[in-house]
Amino acid sequence: MLQGSYSYPLVFASLFIATVASYTTLDLVGRIATLRGGARRFWWLVGGAIAMGLGVWSMHFVGMLSFSLPIPLGYDAAITFASLVIATLVAYFALDLVSRGTLSPTRLVGSGILMGLGIAAMHYTGMAALRMEPSIRYVLPILLASVGIAIVASIAALWIAHALRGARPGLMRVRRFGAALVMGIAITGMHYTGMAAAEFPADSICRAANGVNSGWLAISVSGATLGILAITMVLSLLDSRMEVRTSQLVERLQHQATHDALTGLPNRTRLAERIQAAIQTARESGEQFAVYFIDLDGFKAINDSLGHNVGDAVLKELAQRLRLAVRREDMVARFGGDEFVVFADRVPDPASAARLAEKLLDAFKAHFDLPGAAMSISPSIGIAMFPEDGDTVDMLLSHADAAMYVVKGNGRNNFRFFETSMNAATLRTISIQQGLRAGMEHDQFFLHYQPKFDCSGASIVGAEALLRWRHPELGLISPAEFIPVAEKSGQILALGQWVLEQVCREMRAWQDAGRSVAPIAVNLSQIQLRSPGLVEDILATKRRHGIAPDLLMFEITESAAMENADETRKTVDRLKAAGFALAIDDFGTGYSSLSHLQEFGVQQMKVDRAFIRTLAEENPQARSIVTAIIRLAHALEMEVVAEGVETPEQLRLLQELQCDQTQGYLLGRPMSGDDFSRLLNPDVTASTAFPTVAALPA
């Protein structure tokens, strides 16, 4: 028999290649395991199989090159390529298997046997590439031992790769290196055991001998293989980092979509999802849970007096307090503004719900440290229980909100469970709040115009635009009812813009129809006055419809004007500079400063109807007050408009007091835009349009 020998540098090179290939394989398994099917996973499997198969085959080929006989050796290219194909197919099978979700013991052993047989087939196919004559003889016990080593090594490799695919990044590299070294030794051991099983007769010749230097061939194959393995690892690392960054970005976006930016608490979207999931679970288990609607009492005063930065700091501290007051399985969410909602899971009875409510109240007992002072804030808490108080998310939140409103109406700083009797008034308020946006979108709102007359009642000098709402279920709703709700819910800005748009649109239509147009007064709320974009929005609307500024007047209530007099004056100055007229509405009900009234320089002062109502009675004080208001306005070069004139006697006294204009049911009730525009026809006089005017004494 011919005696073979080994080049130990190439032996160690084959071990190194096997170890690097094993490490690359483990890295690829962890990468592919994160992919959820589709073309991307398939191509990673193909690329990984080529890299892994090439690595295992290269180890085998370099190991073959390390072996030498006293005769020239060479390798048949076609058979050698076939061994590479076998290695690649085995690698694909292995990568696909260990990157899937589960690997049962039975599946592990069966797959290890198939993979071991595949590796053995690759090895002995590579041996056949020598094309020895006579053929290589194999010692059966050693051959079987090599196949056994291949099977055991394959089972171990599959188990290690599957176990390490979800390891933590900190220890993952170290563990993968150790596992790769073990796998490399096992693969190399199988190869050299198989080589030991081969016997070469003394008269053997190699028909594939070609005179190529085996050392340079080993270096070329090793270098190319290691380069491909390195590129594969780099691509895997870069792709993994890109996916991690993408995943982190998606997580941040999801967090932003479901959490409040200020407090970090879940928002109403995340809250609704949590309650909906709890409803489904509770229906199956028969358990109860509670929803707490929390509204801060007097929080607006903190924002107005100390600024929004201080208010934000209070909300963030309160969020932390509420988190500490509830259990781990409960949820605290910011519902909006100064409203919070607590979801308490598995609450067995109202007594347990009440105990948690007491804890929530206790969270407010400690003072909030604000700049320059320590301030206490109290909550109003409404509670709704599932399933007694509702079986949907909206119903539970609405009923908890209804109970909270009852607490506010009964002194605040307390909690209250929902009761069916609360539905009438409170749920009406909720329906109004929820219906405001739909009302604007579906033309449920409309305008009436109440004419303003000169004090003689002889001519129409303008009108006031009055907003009306015909709700599809609640019917006609008074502005006195829905305007405060719109202000509280923050929808007054959109509603005010709708009014201005509608007024300008109708005035444009009147002008296009060739009708005369009189100045129209539009009311501005306190919230609108604080809006930084108010003047720009008004100017944009005016330009859009081509309305002259002298055809619009803006009315501001006395209390709203004095709420923040300096800011009001700035807004008034900008409106006046743009050519708009202004009026102080409901004068006499607020607390005006004469200096502020003088600074405002508005065109009109409207006397509140409460003074006009008692003017004709035997009440000398009422007459004195109205007289003083009229004289004050005239001294400040303002016109005076008397609101709520309903009797001829009231009109007569106002004429004696030299009031400038009147407005009220006596002369003209609110009417539609078409009806009002027809009154502006030059051929129509106030006396012909309104019989009441004609009946007045000259």
Image (cartoon, rainbow, N blue to C red):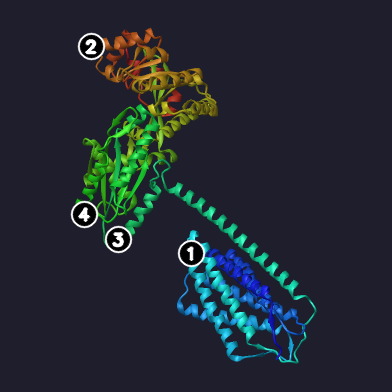
Q: Amino acid at mark 3?
A: Arg
Q: Are marks 4 and 2 in contact (CB under 8 Å)?
A: no
Which residue is label 1 attached to? 166
Q: Amino acid at mark 4?
A: Asp
Q: CA distance from mark 3 to mark 1?
A: 36 Å
Q: Earlier in the sequence, mark 4 or mark 2?
A: 4
State the SS at label 3: helix
Q: Amino acid at mark 2?
A: Gln
| Vertical relation: 5 (above or below) 44 | below
Marks 4 and 1: which is nearer the front? 1
Q: Position of residue 71 (x, y in %)?
A: 76, 85
Marks 3 and 1: which is nearer the front? 1
Residue at x-position 26% and y-position 14%: 615
Which residue is label 4 attached to? 349
State the SS at label 2: helix
Residue at x-position 56% and y-position 56%: 241
Marks 2 and 1: which is nearer the front? 1
Q: CA distance from mark 2 to mark 1?
A: 87 Å
Q: CA distance from mark 4 to mark 1?
A: 43 Å
Nearer the observer, 633 or 284:
284
Q: Earlier in the sequence, mark 4 or mark 1?
A: 1
Q: Amino acid at mark 1?
A: Gly
**The N terminus lies in which quarter of the figure?**
bottom right
Marks 2 and 3: which is nearer the front? 3
